[in-house]
Amino acid sequence: MFQSRTANCIERSLQAPIASETKLRTFEQRHLSVSRSARYAIMGSLEEDLSEVWIVCHGHGQLAKRFLGRFLPIERSDRLFVAPEGLSRYYLAPPKGGPHPPNTPVGASWMTSEDRDFEIQDYVRYLDQLHDEIFSVVDRDKVRLWVLGFSQGTATAARWVARGRVEPDRVVLCAGLLPPELDTESAARLVRRSPLTIVLGRHDDFATPERVAEQEMRLKAVGVPYTTIRFDGGHEITPDVLMRLTETTS
């Protein structure tokens, strides 16, 4: 009896109509341009009789105001320091059993690999707008303009100079790598007025000999003149490095 019922069930299942193949849904992603607030920090006064303006791009996980503290050793009344902050902020520590408490450290990032082309476009436009804001007050013809990037900010600074409206007198890239898409034409914008300056710590785990050699080969391939400053330190900007930079100003 049991075998007969089983056989009947199998037979009925074999005779049941087969469902048509299910069509997978497709999802389309689109983009919408929006206005938003961007934060930046300054050290110095736009109203002073300035000789230099430094626009400095922080590294991954840093905030603009704290990053400016690195430049206190070279603070002068005729120098204005401007630190734009990355548009994406996040908690630096994971939550522990509930929401983040108010004192949880926060950092900012310039971009990730997700939707990278639009993120790059967004921060280039942002930095252009900040540049225009500063030089609506400061006479550009009377100051020397520095653009400095640290760590993740090196690619940010390089892309901005290559793609944006800024025309700096000096470009300094500290403890980071050139953006991978940089070609001969865009790289030429980095050195319009002076050679590119690369700053590397001898004990920086990020600046391995292989990465340094690869970057030097890329710079030569795209025809970029550059100088390298090496210092006894790690993944950082030190007072000694800043003093050496300002001493080599021509």
Image (cartoon, rainbow, N blue to C red):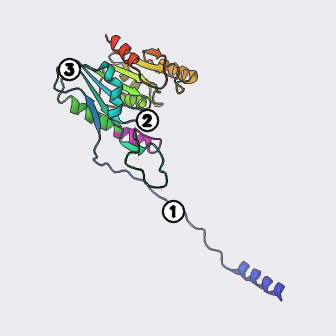
The type of residue carrying mark 3 is: Leu
N-terminal of the pair, mark 1 or mark 3, is: 1
For label 3, the crowd category at 10 Å Cα-Cα, with few meaning under 14, some 14 to 19 and many 20 or more, is many
N-terminal of the pair, mark 3 or mark 2, is: 3
Contact between labelled residues 3 and 1, with CB atoms less than 8 Å apart: no
Contact between labelled residues 2 and 3, with CB atoms less than 8 Å apart: no
Q: Which residue appears at 28% of the width and 33% of the height?
A: 41
* Badge 1 element: loop
- Say which of 144 and 115 sits in front: 144
Contact between labelled residues 2 and 1, with CB atoms less than 8 Å apart: no
The magenta segment: 108-122
For label 2, the crowd category at 10 Å Cα-Cα, with few meaning under 14, some 14 to 19 and many 20 or more, is some
The type of residue carrying mark 1 is: Arg
Q: CA distance from mark 1 to mark 3?
A: 59 Å
Q: Is residue 176 magenta?
A: no
Which residue position is annotated with label 2? 60
- Say which of 6 and 212 sits in front: 212
Residue 5 position in % (x across, y down): 79, 86
Q: Is residue 119 magenta?
A: yes
The type of residue carrying mark 2 is: His
Which residue position is annotated with label 3? 50
Which residue position is annotated with label 1? 25
